[in-house]
Image: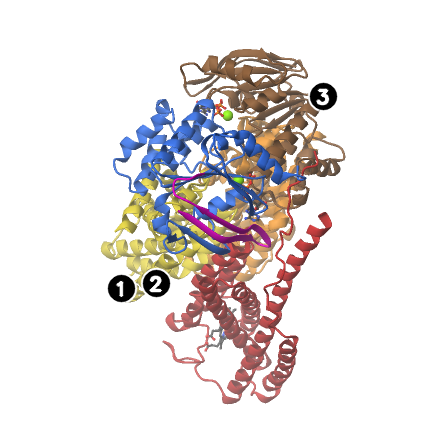
Chain colours: A red, B brown, C blue, D yellow, E orange
Amino acid sequence: MSMNLEREKAVLTGTQLSEVKSTNLSKILFGATVISMLISLYFIFIFAAEETTMHAAQKIFYFHVSSAWLAFMAFFVTFVFSILFLIKRKRIFDTYAYVSAEIGIVFTIIVLTTGPIWAKSAWNTWWVWEPRLITTLILFFIYIAYIMIRQMDGVWDKKARLSSVFGIIGFADVPIVFFAIRWWQTKFHPIVFGDGPSQQGGGIESSMLVALLVTITAFTILYAYLLNKGVSFENMKIKVDRYKEKLREELEK
Amino acid sequence: MIEIKKLTKQADNKLILRGVDLSIKKGETVAILGPNGAGKSTLLKVLATLIKPTSGLIKINGLDLKKDHIEIKKLLGYLPHSSLLYDHYSPLENLVFFGNIYGVNNVEQKASKLVKEVGLSFFLNEPVKNFSRGMIQRIAIARAIIHDPEILLLDEPHTGLDQGAISILNNVILSMKEKGATTLMVTHDFKQAAEICDRIIIVKNGRIVDDFKIENRNLGFVSEKYGLQMEGVS
Amino acid sequence: MIEIKKLTKQADNKLILRGVDLSIKKGETVAILGPNGAGKSTLLKVLATLIKPTSGLIKINGLDLKKDHIEIKKLLGYLPHSSLLYDHYSPLENLVFFGNIYGVNNVEQKASKLVKEVGLSFFLNEPVKNFSRGMIQRIAIARAIIHDPEILLLDEPHTGLDQGAISILNNVILSMKEKGATTLMVTHDFKQAAEICDRIIIVKNGRIVDDFKIENRNLGFVSEKYGLQMEGVS
Amino acid sequence: MNLFRTALLLAKKDLYSELKTKQILTTQIIFAGLVIVVFSFAFDPANNTTKAVIPGVIWVIIVFAGILGLNRSFISEQRNDTMQGLLVAPMESSSIYLGKFLANFAMMLVVEIVSIPFLFLLFDFKFNGSLGYFVLVIFLGSFGFIAIGTFLAALAANSKSSEMLLPLLLFPITTPILIGVVQATKIILTNMEKLSSAIAWIQLVTAYDVIFFVVCFLLIDYVLEV
Amino acid sequence: MNLFRTALLLAKKDLYSELKTKQILTTQIIFAGLVIVVFSFAFDPANNTTKAVIPGVIWVIIVFAGILGLNRSFISEQRNDTMQGLLVAPMESSSIYLGKFLANFAMMLVVEIVSIPFLFLLFDFKFNGSLGYFVLVIFLGSFGFIAIGTFLAALAANSKSSEMLLPLLLFPITTPILIGVVQATKIILTNMEKLSSAIAWIQLVTAYDVIFFVVCFLLIDYVLEV
Ligand code: HEM
Ligand SMILES: Nc1ncnc2c1ncn2[C@@H]1O[C@H](COP(=O)(O)OP(=O)(O)OP(=O)(O)O)[C@@H](O)[C@H]1O
Ligand SMILES: Nc1ncnc2c1ncn2[C@@H]1O[C@H](COP(=O)(O)OP(=O)(O)OP(=O)(O)O)[C@@H](O)[C@H]1O
Ligand SMILES: [Mg+2]
Ligand SMILES: [Mg+2]
């Protein structure tokens, strides 16, 4: 009565994952992130002019707008890698899409927290129901749903396929967030770049603009670092899973 | 052990069971044969307290099925067509859960022992949902016997099992029989019926049309008797 | 007819099929045997285009499975574990619906003929949901062959069938064979395999470990070969 | 074309089985009724200002009743794995999408035809906008909602708890449509002077509808792939 | 007592499988968030009078998120007929009811703890009523809602389209509770002077809760009977 179903070598030997990511790149990125962050802090707090009405609270503007842009970019990367995945079906594309979406969510959370903090001092309320705020919140929900699809049960390629599809569809909200204040007349959100229906608030002092651009650059480097780190971490997890399976196999023999 | 009197079951306007009388003694291993749609599974469901009979009396171990159903349920091990397993749980978790519900002592140990016995120890901690049909059936068998039931109600238990698993199952049934368990087994596989059963019941059209004992695994005898009943039906 | 080269299928980190090479000629009736969890059903699912293989090449009738899947699907009749029937529809409605999808001519007539053939003409207009396991399996068989497929993929087709239905099924397979159909049948029932198949494939651990022809319904030969492969396992 | 033939067969099958059981439609309609009653509790219909919430209520009904139907549409194919039956049949996946879409859309329209007049009646609403535009907005909004909904229902059906996942996926993606139609409905029902702005909304919704219908049509292959 | 032992086992099983997948809870919470958003654009929250709808919105969230969880609770037992596995096990049906109730109630409380503060934040609501009473009302209302809901979910699960049937059964039966708690919440949140009237509502709801819990407990045998 000791018959057992066999399962010999049920694990893939030989990892197909190539060790592209050298630790060097990660170190360089880390250094660059630290340096550029320090520079941007200098620009924000010392170089840039103080806003007349809101004073120090206005400094949050740099983080707010930079993280918003970074969130957009992260979701765009997810979008691109989702398409690539559907065409090429390489796991690495899916990993990139996934990690980028996660980073995007983190940046969206930053927008959603810095926004209200700022709003408290600017509009004297934590939250108003205004198109950009709604659409940003929705953006957040869309990518939470994206993560939910990834948490579904099943083999990875099914999850990757479905979440790629959703990553493509969900991206539709990003341009909407961007254009929200330009389509709807809004009383609240200022339009700084480009023109909208009402030109109020447009324009920005040049020292502020420089500080903003520096911050965005710093955030972009941070994003690159996080993406790199996240992807190698995911790859590691995949590999560990594989080893674990193998190890267990051998233990049970 | 089991006493069935004038059992009928009606669903809508259709009589599925039309007066079944049956008495089974402790320790017997009974095969229930019969064509498709005869009412075999329905009979088993009634015994498992899953369906209320329309009329008739059922006593198990002297207890009335209607009144003492909790007591009776403790005695029963039921294996229906579906596996009754939680898909996202592993075999171990499934067996431990059901074992706990039946109040089995030392349930973890017992569960792993059973999983090993049905030959799936490699899959002890993997979710059941990815299992193949035969593997699921193996775990379903383990589930049905986790509490050492005194009465086994098996509905086509050999379905999907490979040769190895069939002999495991037969051994399980035989070893439980030695411990005094009573078994009712619905099957279409005369060979297995002849192999492990000592009594055969043939059901046709909701009635018991034949009821005889067999000896020495006499497969030919069973086929002959069955053929006799099915004459003209194809 | 069917050409499989280096077929592998991986689910997460588990290799289910590890390089299957197989070529089946038109008109052959092939039985696929093997222990539980060997990968038999998975192989059939890959052929039925229900699962994408991880790697490998499959050609059916000279057409590539990836590219011309619509053409290929027309040739296939697939009978899996589940019935693929709509519960609240009657057998007739089910068959007519699937027949229409396959573009069968004269579908009503053909459907009633098939239902009659599988011995359920009494139940022609009753919803499938109340049927017994064997009755459902009969209709499922009818569904799989409604469009006179050239290739039959049957996964344990004898499950739940009574003796009469088994011989009906065997006759159906044999008569389709005469018309030139190719059949792949997964089964654990050596007797049926020996009865209707002229070639046996044994799958173990996601690989084909044996492949031989049989003649004269030589059941003993099959068991022997199978036993040889499973040595030390059970 | 074969694509449409099989799509129609599928839609027919779904509608026919609905005709037999009438389960989904009845539930949807009763549900719509319940929502209306609940709202009439919450906002006293006698009060004149509550007239302003009517556009919102119309779309809340469509959304929630719609989700009920969408959920069933693919879950009902899971019993006995009939979905596999469709997948092994010789047809494009887009045919399945189209068929399901048609069936869902037809049922949605029936629900609307029944419940919207009931709503107007209960809230004693005098319709004096443009009926043509109103019907157009309802049609466009439902079209987009059901088109995206059918697609996402197919996607969600892969999950164990799909009836929970669907709203999560559906709401955020369809908000632009919903915002657009609510605004347009509001204008059409209460303030016909601003028609041009309503038309702008309608155009926006139409564009969104078309884009998403095409995208869904193209991507459904990947969703239904097994 | 054996009744409680098996009920706890069942609740543990459900909660453990939820802990593993976290699907239901996440979905409920996000769903709650989405309902808030939908309401926000259906009814402009900038408008000050809409603050008055907050008690309503709280309960709409609880009701809809609750329905999602209730639906799953028995439907999840349909796959592989695990419900039969519970029915053939030696325990009272009331044990099954109690176990499911405990699991659902626990999850409901988690959803409330997360979503209500979120709601206050988003609608910029300043809480200046009595927190103790507020928690009590939420607790009592959820208790009654889940108690009746679990019962009706068991009833609805026997139908093929149970996730549609449940809201239909649930809404009418729980209306008294809902009206009561909405009124009580309204008073506690906005108008603490009328506390005595709120307490009257609370007593009413408590009575309803107790009666229905006992009735459900007694009647569940007939519902689960096969
Ligand atoms: C409460 C939550 C808030 C959210 C979710 C939010 C969201 C966003 C997002 C997503 C962007 C980037 C879009 C873009 O760059 O075009 C943005 C930009 C901006 N936000 Fe906010 N915001 C919030 C509050 C505020 C507040 C209170 C203020 C200031 C009074 C503010 C001022 C700005 C400015 C000046 C920009 C750059 C505008 C531009 O696009 O030209 N935001 N916000
Ligand atoms: N709920 C029901 N309503 C109507 N008829 C039913 C119902 N349940 C079962 N039947 C009918 O009762 C008959 C017997 O069903 P049962 O499942 O007991 O058959 P069985 O002997 O197990 O057959 P099989 O060998 O195919 O498993 C069938 O004809 C079936 O159609
Ligand atoms: N989605 C999946 N994820 C992980 N493993 C899977 C998946 N599907 C199948 N398997 C595994 O693949 C193996 C082969 O399954 P398959 O259903 O093909 O077996 P089979 O040969 O048909 O067995 P049986 O005779 O029991 O029907 C099993 O070990 C099963 O656990
Ligand atoms: Mg049966
Ligand atoms: Mg199989």
Q: Looking at the image, which residue is at 53% across and 19% down?
A: B33
Specify the segment rendered in magenta: C1-29
Q: CA distance from mark 2 to mark 1?
A: 24 Å
Image coordinates of residue D173 in percent, x first then y, are 43, 59
Label 3 crowd (10 A; few <14 / some 14-19 / many >=20) = few
Under tag 2, what secondary structure? helix
Residue C2 falls within the magenta-colored stretch: yes
Image coordinates of residue A225 in percent, x first then y, are 60, 75
Does residue B137 appear left or right of residue E45 in this picture?
Answer: right
- Mark 1, chain letter? D
Image coordinates of residue E76 in percent, x first then y, are 55, 40
Under tag 1, what secondary structure? helix
Q: Which residue is mark 1?
A: D195
Nearest to N terminus: mark 2 or mark 1? 1
Q: CA distance from mark 3 to mark 2?
A: 71 Å
Count of numbered marks? 3
Nearer to the camera, D190 or B168: B168
Label 1 crowd (10 A; few <14 / some 14-19 / many >=20) = some
Q: Which residue is mark 3?
A: B178
- Circle number at residue D211: 2
- Mark 3, chain letter? B
Q: Looking at the image, which residue is at 57% across and 16% down?
A: B200
Under tag 3, what secondary structure? helix
Nearer to the camera, E59 or C29: C29
Q: Nearer the viewer, mark 3 or mark 2?
A: 3
- Mark 2, chain letter? D
Residue C165 falls within the magenta-colored stretch: no
